[in-house]
Image (tube, helix red, strand yellow):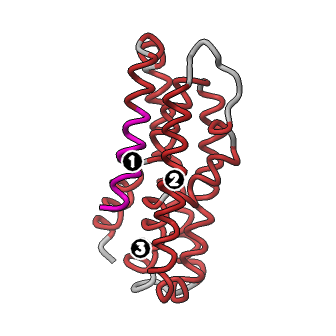
């Protein structure tokens, strides 16, 4: 296995902006680091679950990907439009709890996030299974990739925390921009 290609693929996919990372940044902006960490823990747990499912059921999933992909695109894009609307209408003067700032919403978002689903369905069969078939090696790979994903999410939490004052100062434009990023992500699923 080319470890460099594997790591580059993992880091590029997990650290670049996507629906989960955008929601994390928006959650820090609107509800603070603690709420964003709750969301991040849920997203990380689901990310690991998806990797485990990919590792265990790869051959079955490959045979039904076309049907799964269409359903995931539809559900995922609709959910991202919903999140975009929620982010757009948020106000910093009302920092009460929100459904997008919970462990469960972070968990569920991963199953509806086509970027994450496609990544988890491709990283194991492309980089791990051709070279390692032992349960220990596959489990260690899943844990390593999950850790990389957590570090990516944590980076977005830290970025939001560091720039929180700036983000609050420009609350409405930031919310509009985050909502537009999600709309763009949802739209690009279909291109």
The residue stretch that appears in magenta: 178-191
SS of the residue at dot 2? helix
Tell me the quarter of the picture where residue 98 sits: top right
The residue at the point 54 percent across, 41 percent down is: 83
Question: What label does residue 122 carry, if any?
Answer: 3
SS of the residue at dot 1? helix
Question: Which SS type dominates the magenta stretch?
Answer: helix
Residue at numbered disc 2: 78
The residue at the point 60 percent across, 74 percent down is: 53
Nearest the eye: 174 or 13: 174
| Residue 96 coordinates in the image, percent (x, y) | 70, 22
SS of the residue at dot 3? helix
Q: Earlier in the sequence, mark 1 or mark 3?
A: 1
On screen, residue 6 versus residue 26, left or right, reads left
Residue at numbered disc 1: 15
| Residue 155 coordinates in the image, percent (x, y) | 45, 38
Is disc 2 surrounded by few (<14), some (14 to 19) or many (20+) residues within 10 Å?
Answer: some
User: Of circles 2 and 3, which is in front?
Assistant: 2
Q: Quadrant of the C terminus?
A: bottom left
């Amino acid at each position: 296995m080319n470890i460099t290609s594997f790591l580059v693929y993992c880091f590029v996919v997990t650290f670049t902006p996507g629906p989960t990372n955008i929601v994390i940044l928006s959650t820090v902006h609107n509800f603070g680091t603690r709420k964003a960490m709750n969301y991040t823990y849920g997203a990380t747990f689901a990310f690991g679950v998806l990797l485990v499912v990919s590792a265990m059921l790869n051959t079955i999933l490959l045979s039904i990907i076309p049907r799964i992909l269409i359903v995931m695109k539809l559900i995922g894009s609709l959910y991202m439009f919903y999140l975009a609307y929620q982010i757009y209408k948020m106000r910093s003067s009302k920092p009460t709890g929100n459904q997008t700032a919970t462990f469960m919403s972070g968990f569920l978002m991963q199953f509806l996030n086509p970027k994450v689903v496609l990544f988890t369905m491709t990283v194991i069969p492309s980089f791990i299974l051709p070279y390692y078939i032992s349960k220990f090696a596959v489990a260690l790979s899943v844990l390593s990739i999950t850790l990389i994903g957590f570090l990516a999410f944590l980076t977005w939490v830290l970025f939001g925390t560091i720039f929180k004052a700036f983000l609050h100062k420009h609350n409405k434009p930031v919310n509009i921009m985050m909502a537009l990023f999600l709309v763009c992500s949802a739209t690009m699923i279909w291109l």
